[in-house]
Image (cartoon, rainbow, N blue to C red):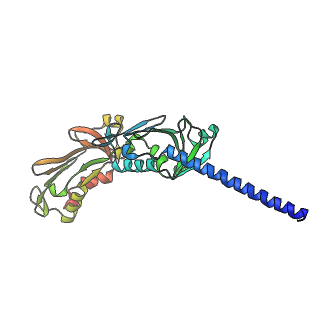
């Protein structure tokens, strides 16, 4: 074999060795990333009993109880909790993107820029999470005591970034439509009462209501949802005496729901007539559940 051929063979062998080394290093990094991914999340969600989300301006305490999940002491929205637990159980979407502490501010996972996620139950999980700017999905996370930063694909960063009220159950009332016998509505000086008469609805004086529009109203009353919650200042300033509107739904001699409304520039604030939570509701939803008498004739 000539010297030239030996040189070519050596070059080929050298290239193969470099390729093997690169593959081996990549494999070790992938394995390390998967292992850290398992440690980052991979929670047994059946054993998770609380999740704390905290940032510079607010803290969200999600706690499992015998009656379901609560958020800062209020009932939590079931769908939102389901999405969070599903994200905490996922271990398939991790990519190592940085190993230097200098990258933390840029990726939103520094102590000042990120939000802290603490999971209690099963095993402790504590992460610093940063959502991607501009509303793009995914984000970044690191262990609270670690430097390595991992890219997260999926909904977890967005969920962690939510303020406390977005976790709350916005259901005002759920009513079985078959149980409704009387609907009373007050809108400023306008007042009317609808009563069930077999399969039809009539006004208190016996005049029949439009059957299609009355059926639409009954369907709207089956589930009443808020668009959000009044702030403490808004709740304190709300004027419910006299109310801008009042809705009372009765069935079989008992009151199923009774709500009072305070009109605002961007909709209404609503609460039960005896007090309690003050919700926000938009004008369209308010008109659906307290329509004008003219629209029902």
Q: Residue at x 79, y 61 (%)?
A: 12
Would residue 198 appear left or right of 154 to someone viewing this image?
A: left
Q: Position of residue 154 (x, y in %)?
A: 49, 52
Q: Residue at x 9, y 49 (%)?
A: 253
Extreme residue in the front direction: 1
Extreme residue in the right direction: 3
Classify residue 270 by image quadrant: top left
Classify residue 204 by image quadrant: bottom left
Would residue 157 appear left or right of 219 to someone viewing this image?
A: right
Q: Residue at x 62, y 44 (%)?
A: 98
Viewer can see residue 34: yes
Quarter of the picture containing the N terminus is bottom right
Viewer can see residue 291: no
Comparing 24 with 96, the one in front is 24
Quarter of the picture containing the C terminus is bottom left
Q: Position of residue 129 (x, y in %)?
A: 51, 42
Q: Residue at x 70, y 56 (%)?
A: 20
Q: Position of residue 165 (x, y in %)?
A: 38, 42
Would residue 242 appear left or right of 43 to someone viewing this image?
A: left
Q: How many marks?
A: 0
Comparing 81 with 40, the one in front is 40
Q: Position of residue 61 (x, y in %)?
A: 39, 37
Q: Is residue 258 above or below residue 212?
A: above
């Amino acid at each position: 074999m000539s010297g030239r051929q030996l040189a070519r063979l050596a070059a080929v062998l050298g290239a193969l060795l470099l390729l093997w080394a690169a593959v081996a290093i990549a494999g070790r990094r992938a394995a390390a990333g998967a292992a850290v991914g398992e440690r980052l999340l991979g929670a047994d969600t059946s054993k998770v009993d609380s999740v704390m989300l905290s940032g510079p301006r607010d803290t969200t305490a999600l706690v499992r109880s015998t009656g379901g999940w609560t958020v800062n002491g209020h009932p939590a929205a079931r769908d939102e909790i389901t999405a969070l637990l599903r994200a905490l159980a996922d271990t398939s979407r991790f990519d190592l993107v940085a190993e230097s502490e200098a990258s933390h501010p840029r990726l939103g996972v520094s102590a000042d820029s990120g939000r802290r996620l603490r999971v209690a139950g099963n095993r402790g999980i504590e992460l610093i999470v940063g959502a991607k700017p501009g509303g793009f999905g995914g984000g970044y996370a690191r262990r609270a005591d670690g430097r390595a930063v991992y890219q997260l694909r999926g909904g977890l960063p967005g969920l962690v970034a939510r303020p406390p009220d977005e976790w709350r159950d916005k259901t005002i009332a759920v009513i079985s439509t078959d149980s409704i016998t009387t609907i009373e509505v007050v809108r400023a000086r306008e007042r009317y009462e609808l009563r069930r008469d077999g399969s039809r609805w009539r006004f208190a004086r016996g005049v029949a209501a439009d059957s299609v529009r009355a059926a639409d109203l009954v369907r709207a009353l089956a589930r009443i949802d808020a668009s959000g919650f009044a702030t403490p200042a808004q709740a304190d300033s709300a004027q419910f005496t006299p109310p801008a509107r009042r809705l009372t739904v009765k069935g079989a001699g008992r009151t199923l729901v009774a709500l009072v409304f305070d009109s605002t520039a961007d909709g209404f604030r609503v609460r039960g007539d005896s007090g309690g939570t003050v919700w926000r509701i938009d004008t369209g939803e308010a008109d659906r559940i307290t329509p004008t008498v003219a629209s029902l004739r």
